[in-house]
Image: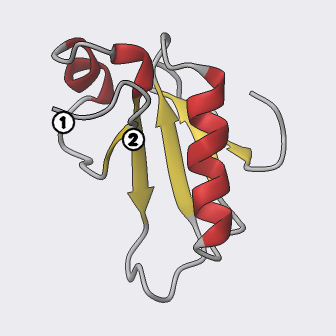
Amino acid sequence: MVREDAILATNTSSLSVTEISVATVRPRRVVGMHFFNPAPVQEFVEVIKTVVTEPDVVEDVLALARKLARCRSSRRTARASSRTRCCSAI
């Protein structure tokens, strides 16, 4: 059990973020957070949201990426392949 405001961020690239989210009680709080290899060197993280991911969840995860000095982060939806830089709105 986790708190209701917990975010489930998965780093998997082989499982669908959408499939993971629908298997949870709170699918709106699930995102993908993919660190590119080699993770200690790359300043890039991809944040993948589903069609139901709450916007504040995406913003919180992007803020975490910035704190981790991953300033050049990207985000996309689980259904689309278009990517944008972290500082622009979805």
Residue 6: where, in percent of width, then height? 38, 35
Side of 51 where 64 appears, left or right? right
Q: Which residue corresponds to mark 2?
A: 32
Instruction: Choose top left, top right, bottom left or bottom right for residue 26.
Output: top left
| The N terminus, quarter of image | top left
- The residue sitting at 63% across, 33% down in the picture is 82
Q: Kindly report which numbered mark, 1 or 2, lies closer to the viewer in this rendering.
A: 2
Q: Neighbour class for label 1 at 10 Å: few (<14), some, many (≥20)? A: few
2 and 90: which one is in front? 2
- Amino acid of disc 2: Gly
Q: Residue furthest right?
A: 88
Residue 62: where, in percent of width, then height? 63, 50
| The C terminus, quarter of image | top right
- The residue sitting at 59% across, 61% down in the picture is 65
Q: Neighbour class for label 2 at 10 Å: few (<14), some, many (≥20)? A: many
- The residue sitting at 59% across, 35% down in the picture is 58
Q: Which residue corresponds to mark 1?
A: 15
- The residue sitting at 24% across, 35% down in the picture is 2
Residue 20: where, in percent of width, then height? 21, 25
Q: Helix, strand, or loop for circle 2?
A: strand
Q: Which mark is residue 35?
A: none
Q: Is residue 45 above or below residue 58?
A: below
Residue 32: where, in percent of width, then height? 39, 41
Q: Is residue 55 above or below residue 31?
A: above
Of mark 1 and mark 2, the one earlier in the sequence is: 1
